[in-house]
Amino acid sequence: MEEQSNSSSVPVPEFLLICFPNYQSWQHWLSLPLSLLFLLAMGANVTLLITIRLEASLHEPMYYLLSLLSMLDIVLCLTVIPKVLAIFWFDDRYMNFSACFLQMFIMNSFLTMESCTFMVMAYDRYVAICKPLRYPSIITDQFVARAAIFVAARNGLLTMPIPILSSQLRYCSRIIKNCICTNMSVSKLSCDDITFNKLYQFVIGWTLLGSDLILIILSYSFILKAVARIKAEGAVAKALSTCGSHFILILFFSTVLLVLVITNLARDRIPPDVPILLNILHHLIPPALNPIVYGVRTKEIKQGIQNLLRRF
């Protein structure tokens, strides 16, 4: 197979994905841990969703938001990991034009949806600790429904132009040096000027993720300020335990995302396979850890899982 010339554009019915261009022998070794993590992520999130669905004691807004996070994790995993494993196991490197840009849209939109969900969960914890008497009237089932619509609409609509802009480009090559269809991996194959594409993704990405992070920091600042005023013995530990799991997940999500951004910015100084691997892990490790952290640290969920296991 010959790579198309860069001097002229060609119709692109499908792309060819080249995972780890410098270390393709890694693929067989990576397939086992990635498969195990994928099964762990899917099993843990499905178990959490079933537990919340069947346990009447978990039919509360906080757990509905956790269900939303689990559903986002499942979709992200199913969008990325099966194709990566198909490349590793069956050498299925081809992805058609439409599937590539659909994957690009889901990755961009659902990543920002997760960030927005963390922001809503931070607000939930802020109301629970700082305005406990008003919590039942503010954080209701209707609030969760409106929040879910907001999460989907804001992030879906604002990230939709990213794959649309990329799909309108003329491509001089169809060989993507990545395991997945990221915007930059695909757009740089174009014969056209991609300055606007890069600028739009940069502005939208930092606006959505940055605004969520600012609101999360503000929420926890108010929480810590309120906790510092609590005088009752043991009340501080109880208050912090209610948002400890959430804070751990936000910290992990932000840290992994920050490492991914830094490695992409320093792409010229590190092996190109490192950002590719980190990108895959970013779509796999947080979905695997989110339900586990909540299951271990939240007594009600742990009890619900035990009841579920006894029932079956």
Image (tube, rainbow, N blue to C red):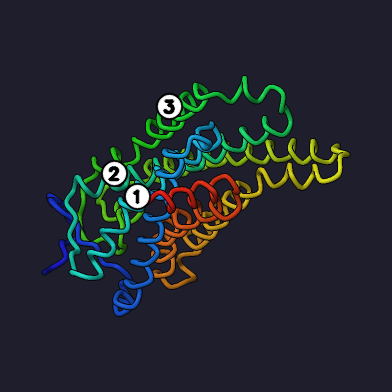
Apparent side of residue 275 relative to residue 225 in the rendered image (left or right): left
The mark found on residue 166 in the picture is: 2
**Residue name at image x 80 percent, y 38 percent:** 225
Residue 22 location (% of width, % of height): 33, 76
Of callouts 3 and 1, which one flags the residue occurring earlier in the amino acid sequence? Answer: 3
Q: Amino acid at mark 1?
A: Asn
Q: Amino acid at mark 3?
A: Ile
**Residue name at image x 27 percent, y 55 percent:** 189
Of callouts 2 and 1, which one flags the residue occurring earlier in the amino acid sequence? Answer: 2
Q: Neighbour class for label 3 at 10 Å: few (<14), some, many (≥20)?
A: few
Q: Neighbour class for label 1 at 10 Å: few (<14), some, many (≥20)?
A: many
Residue 293 location (% of width, % of height): 55, 54
What residue does disc 1 label?
183
What residue does disc 3 label?
149
CA distance separating discs 3 and 1: 25 Å
**Residue name at image x 44 percent, y 42 percent:** 199
Quadrant in the picture for residue 280: bottom left
- Up the image or down, 115 lies above or below 60; here it is below
CA distance separating discs 2 and 1: 7 Å
**Residue name at image x 37 percent, y 67 percent:** 36
Secondary structure under tag 2 reads helix
